[in-house]
């Protein structure tokens, strides 16, 4: 059973600190943007390392013998991340909608789509994802309509972290697009977290975490009435870990501000 009360306590502790100044906040987002871009694209098979991702996004430099497609995936995803952040900041004006989801999917892979694909458009063909068979194409549109309705209605009664997790799970279970569904799902999850004051998260890019991520997700998809608890717990654990790290950053910032004030006092 996910302990959302513990998560609420950690968030309250995080909120008790003074925020970072604009320069530090921008640097924190810059680092997160690189790490999440690397993580989310790596989960889908991108071959670039974290350092190569950093060089590509910060300096626009490509590494010899690496596929150009991998670099384009980085650009697409990092731009989609910025868009997600903008939507979350203006969440009072932004309603969770099919249009928003289509726009996010378009940004995620419009530079790397195949000739036969159209980014941001629901699939018209059946697909199989690992051991899971998503719904037939004719069911995608009605299920997406129901999904959006659920998020904006019943979903609003869930804990924000649980809602973020279930947005991801329900979305990839429908698998509405021909490509980019995993990346889109992770962006939608972080949209929900960010708009409710939680720091954005990412799955650590290593085989152990990828295996745990895929296993937890598959456990929710084995049968129509499968429990969502395994995936909710997986996401909650990452949120908790991220909150701990954010608190440590803010603690250090608080101490630095106190030291600065003390120095000013001593000079007076």
Image (spheres, grey):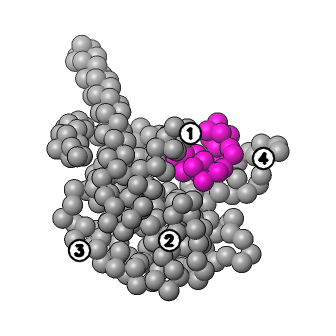
Using the image as rendered, state which of residue 104 and residue 177 is in the foreground.
177
Q: Is disc 3 surrounded by few (<14), some (14 to 19) or many (20+) residues within 10 Å?
A: few
Using the image as rendered, state which of residue 93 and residue 222 is in the foreground.
222
Q: Within the magenta stretch, is there residue 96?
A: no
Q: Secondary structure at mark 4?
A: loop
The numbered mark, 3 or 1, whose residue comes first in the sequence reads 3
Mark 3–mark 4 Cα distance, whole angstroms, equals: 45 Å
The residue stretch that appears in magenta = 33-57
Q: Does any portion of residue 193 appear in the rendered image?
A: no
Please say if the residues under marks 3 and 1 sit with CB atoms less than 8 Å apart: no
Q: Which residue is mark 2?
A: 134
Quadrant for the C terminus in the image: top left
Residue at (51, 37) in percent of width and height: 208
Q: Position of residue 99 (x, y in %)?
A: 44, 78
The numbered mark, 1 or 4, whose residue comes first in the sequence reads 4
Q: Secondary structure at mark 1?
A: helix
Mark 2–mark 3 Cα distance, whole angstroms, equals: 24 Å
Using the image as rendered, state which of residue 64 and residue 158 is in the foreground.
158
Q: Say the numbered circle drawn on residue 153.
A: 3
Identify whether 225 is placed above or below 10.
Answer: below
Residue at (60, 53) in percent of width and height: 44
The numbered mark, 1 or 2, whose residue comes first in the sequence reads 2
Identify whether 126 is placed above or below 182.
Answer: below
Q: Within the magenta stretch, is there residue 39?
A: yes
Mark 3–mark 1 Cα distance, whole angstroms, equals: 36 Å
Q: Which residue is mark 4?
A: 66
């Amino acid at each position: 059973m996910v302990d959302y009360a513990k998560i609420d306590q950690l968030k309250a502790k995080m909120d008790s600190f003074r925020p970072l100044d604009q320069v530090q906040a921008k640097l924190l987002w810059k680092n997160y943007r690189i790490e999440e871009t690397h993580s989310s694209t790596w989960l889908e098979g991108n071959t670039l390392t974290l350092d190569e991702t950093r060089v590509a996004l910060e300096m626009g430099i490509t590494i010899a013998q690496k596929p150009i497609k991998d670099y384009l995936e980085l650009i697409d995803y990092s731009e989609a991340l910025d868009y997600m952040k903008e939507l979350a900041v203006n969440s009072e004006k932004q309603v969770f909608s099919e249009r928003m989801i289509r726009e996010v999917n378009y940004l995620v892979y419009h530079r790397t789509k195949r000739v036969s694909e159209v980014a941001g458009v629901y699939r018209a063909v059946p697909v199989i994802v690992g051991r899971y068979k998503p719904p037939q194409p004719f069911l995608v549109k009605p299920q997406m309509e129901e999904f959006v309705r659920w998020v904006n209605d019943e979903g609003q009664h869930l804990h924000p972290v649980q809602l973020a997790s279930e947005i991801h799970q329900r979305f990839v279970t429908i698998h509405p697009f021909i490509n980019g569904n995993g990346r889109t799902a992770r962006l939608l999850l972080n949209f929900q977290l960010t708009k409710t004051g939680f720091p954005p998260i990412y799955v650590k890019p290593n085989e152990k975490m990828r295996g745990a991520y895929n296993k937890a997700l598959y456990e929710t998809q084995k049968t129509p009435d499968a429990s969502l608890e395994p995936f909710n717990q997986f996401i909650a654990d990452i949120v908790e870990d991220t909150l701990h790290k954010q608190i440590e950053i803010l603690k250090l910032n608080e101490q630095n501000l106190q030291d600065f004030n003390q120095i000013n006092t001593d000079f007076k």
